[in-house]
């Protein structure tokens, strides 16, 4: 069961969020620190442009922000519009969710 450890402060910006680091396929001494990475895209289409977000080195209008988790945190979760650090990563949280239905459950697979 996922445990909410503490509120993320400051709250991450709107945009895409994912955990990076602690690469399991590498030797522990070669792994990068675990962190929450956030991407804010300045142009999400013709109707949305955030002029505060300037082009990066390759010309994309994206701003990146990283947050260092507290000890014991492996992931994050949105609860009532507030982001919290959790003791589980995204894969563990997905395993805790209700199992997906198979095609045979909805009549789509041959019997």
Image (spheres, rainbow, N blue to C red):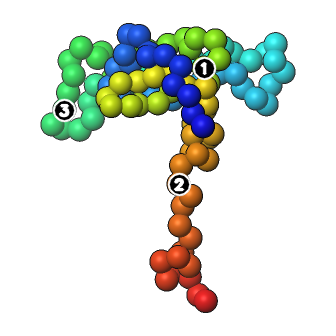
Asked which quadrant contains residue 69, the reply is top right
Whichever of callouts 3 and 2 sits on the residue coming sooner in the sequence is 3
Say which residue label 2 marks: 98
Q: Residue 79's spot in the image, x, y percent?
A: 39, 31
Q: Residue 28's spot in the image, x, y percent?
A: 81, 18
Label 1 or label 3, whichever lies nearer to me, is: 1
Front one among 74 and 34: 74
Q: Residue 24's spot in the image, x, y percent?
A: 76, 29
Question: Furthest residue to the left?
Answer: 47
Say which residue label 3 marks: 48
Determine the secondary structure under disc 2.
loop
Say which residue label 1 marks: 73
Q: Residue 89's spot in the image, x, y percent?
A: 61, 32
Q: Is residue 57 visible?
A: no
How many neighbours does mark 3 have within 10 angstroms: few (below 14), some (14-19), or many (20 or more)?
A: few
The quarter of the image holding the N terminus is top right
Q: Is residue 51 visible?
A: yes
For the residues labelled 3 and 2, the Cα–Cα distance comes to: 35 Å
Label 2 or label 1, whichever lies nearer to me, is: 2
Residue at point 27%, 35% (across, down): 44
Whichever of callouts 1 and 3 sits on the residue coming sooner in the sequence is 3
Whichever of callouts 2 and 1 sits on the residue coming sooner in the sequence is 1
For the residues labelled 1 and 3, the Cα–Cα distance comes to: 34 Å
For the residues labelled 2 and 1, the Cα–Cα distance comes to: 23 Å
Residue at point 49%, 16% (across, down): 6
């Amino acid at each position: 069961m996922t445990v909410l450890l503490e509120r993320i402060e400051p709250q991450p910006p709107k945009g895409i969020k994912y955990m990076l680091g602690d690469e399991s396929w590498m030797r522990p001494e070669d792994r990068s620190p675990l962190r929450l990475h956030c991407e804010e895209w300045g142009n999400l289409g013709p109707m949305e442009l955030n002029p505060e977000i300037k082009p990066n080195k390759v010309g994309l209008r994206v701003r990146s922000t990283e947050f260092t988790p507290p000890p014991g945190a492996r992931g994050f979760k949105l609860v009532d519009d507030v982001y919290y650090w959790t003791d589980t990563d995204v894969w563990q949280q997905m395993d805790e969710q209700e199992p997906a239905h198979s095609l045979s459950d909805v009549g789509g697979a041959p019997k």
